[in-house]
Image: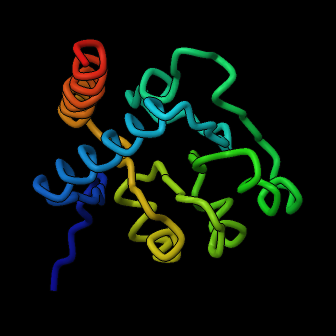
């Protein structure tokens, strides 16, 4: 018997269904547009940088004071958040999943397909999923849908 060693790397990549990706982007951006139109305040948890996701442009409204960014979790911040905020945007769902499980606000998370596969508890605590792009094609699609969805809301309010 001869055994030969195969050199090289095996790469595992997680793929999400394109149609579900589109619907998740549209649903998340429509909700962000509604929060922005109603001058809602957003609590941003975490400081994870997601490559190619322009969530700052989607979240920033007319006033710069509608976003509060917290990098460290405090139980008091989460428990008192319904008094001041309209929604929670979680940039690092693996870190904050336990604390946000029974939050009394809509929770939007930014997660990759690998994170969703490795940590299924993220799905239980999230209300709106904003998928993090994993390639340049996903990044371009996310930006196109963000511009299309966010501009629709500003055009309709400017006319009326």
In the depicted structure, whether residue 19 falls above or below residue 54: below
**Residue at 80% from the left image edge and 63% from the top image edge:** 79
Q: Residue furthest left?
A: 19
Front residue of 57/46: it is 57
Query: Is residue 1 rendered to the left or right of residue 33?
Result: left
**Residue at 12% from the left image edge and 53% from the top image edge:** 18
Q: Position of residue 124 (x, y in %)?
A: 49, 76
Q: Residue furthest bottom?
A: 1
Quarter of the figure with residue 91: top right
Q: Position of residue 6 (x, y in %)?
A: 23, 61
In the depicted structure, whether residue 96 falls above or below residue 119: above
Front residue of 117/89: it is 89
In this view of the protein, can residue 10 be seen by the observer? no
Quarter of the figure with residue 159: top left
Q: Where is residue 68 in the image (x, y as percent from the top left)?
A: 72, 33
**Residue at 82% from the left image edge and 47% from the top image edge:** 72
In the depicted structure, whether residue 61 falls above or below residue 35: above
Quarter of the figure with residue 152: top left
Query: Is residue 111 rendered to the left or right of residue 30?
Result: right
Q: Dividing the image into 4 quarters, which one contains the N terminus?
A: bottom left
Front residue of 34/106: it is 34
In the depicted structure, whether residue 154 falls above or below residue 45: above
Q: Dividing the image into 4 quarters, which one contains the C terminus?
A: top left
In this view of the protein, can residue 57 be seen by the observer? yes
């Amino acid at each position: 018997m001869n055994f030969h060693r195969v050199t090289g790397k095996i790469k595992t990549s997680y793929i999400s269904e394109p149609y579900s990706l589109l619907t998740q982007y549209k649903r998340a951006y429509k909700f962000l547009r509604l929060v922005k139109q109603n001058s809602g305040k957003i609590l941003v948890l975490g400081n994870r940088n997601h490559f190619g996701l322009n969530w700052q442009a989607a979240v920033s409204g007319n006033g710069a004071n509608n976003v509060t960014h917290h990098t460290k979790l405090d139980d008091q911040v989460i428990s008192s958040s319904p008094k001041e905020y309209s929604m929670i945007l979680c940039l690092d769902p693996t870190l904050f999943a336990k604390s946000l499980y029974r939050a009394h606000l809509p929770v939007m998370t930014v997660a990759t397909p690998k994170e969703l596969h490795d940590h299924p508890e993220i799905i239980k605590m999230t209300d709106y999923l904003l998928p993090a792009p994993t390639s340049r094609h996903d990044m371009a699609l996310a930006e196109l849908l963000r511009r299309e969805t966010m501009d629709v809301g500003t055009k309709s309010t400017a006319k009326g």
